[in-house]
Amino acid sequence: MGDSVNLTHHFLIAMPAMADPHFANSLTYVCEHNPEGALGIVVNKPIDMTLSTLFEQIEIPLDDHALREAPVHFGGPVQIDRGFVLHRPLGNWQSTLAISDALGLTTSKDVLEAAARGEGPTDLFVSLGYAGWSAGQLEMELAQNAWLTVEADPNVLFDLPAERRLPAAVRLLGIDISRLSDTAGHG
């Protein structure tokens, strides 16, 4: 394929035919994509847990009420016992993958401790687990039309509720999601 496309800071929109239940109807944000593979976070699957519960589990007192009620998300099927924090601004944390000048993915606790004190990043998205692809795997899935891709808009991630993120990402493509639906129609 020669110079392959780099999908870092792109959304992957699952096509309706996506068979994997982890990714059906999912919107995934690609944090890293290079010849070794790709790492992404599913951003539209909140789980039955709020940040207050998560913070209790990691023994961080959390006073910020807006944060307390924020949902934790299913980020993907890999390392589902580990927290992954997407945030902007980038800031300076112990273990952060810089996705762009403004956005980071942090796996160290310090970003949550700062958030609990009201000193964390302005925007915070917390998931358990991530989605991983080995070398060439994402490219192969793209060739099989498993995903549509579009450059990510962080506002979709941080400013919209979970159920509106996928339609908003599809709108970034300039198409109507109903046109993607299975022609057979499951009624």
Image (cartoon, rainbow, N blue to C red):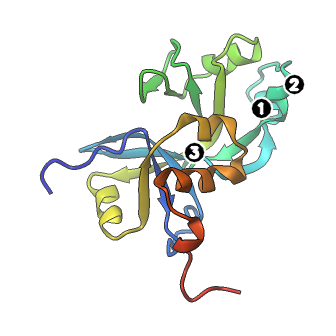
Q: Amino acid at mark 3?
A: Gly
Q: Nearer the viewer, residue 101 or 86?
A: 101
Q: Amino acid at mark 2?
A: His
Looking at the picture, how far across and down is residue 64, in whole percent? 83, 20
State which tag comes first along the sequence, 3 or 1: 1
Q: Residue at x 77, y 32 (%)?
A: 57
Tell me the mark number nearer the camera, choosing from 3 and 2.
2
Report crowding for label 3: few under 14, some 14 to 19, many 20 or more residues within 10 A (C-alpha): many
State which tag comes first along the sequence, 2 or 1: 1
State which tag comes first along the sequence, 3 or 2: 2
Q: Check disc 2 and report the residue beneath it.
A: 65
On screen, residue 161 versus residue 16, left or right, reads right
Q: Residue at x 79, y 44 (%)?
A: 49
Q: Check disc 1 and report the residue beneath it.
A: 57
Looking at the picture, how far across and down is residue 87, in whole percent? 58, 27
Q: Amino acid at mark 1?
A: Gln
| Element carrying mark 1 | helix
Q: Residue furthest front?
A: 174
Indicate whether 120 appears above or below 172: above
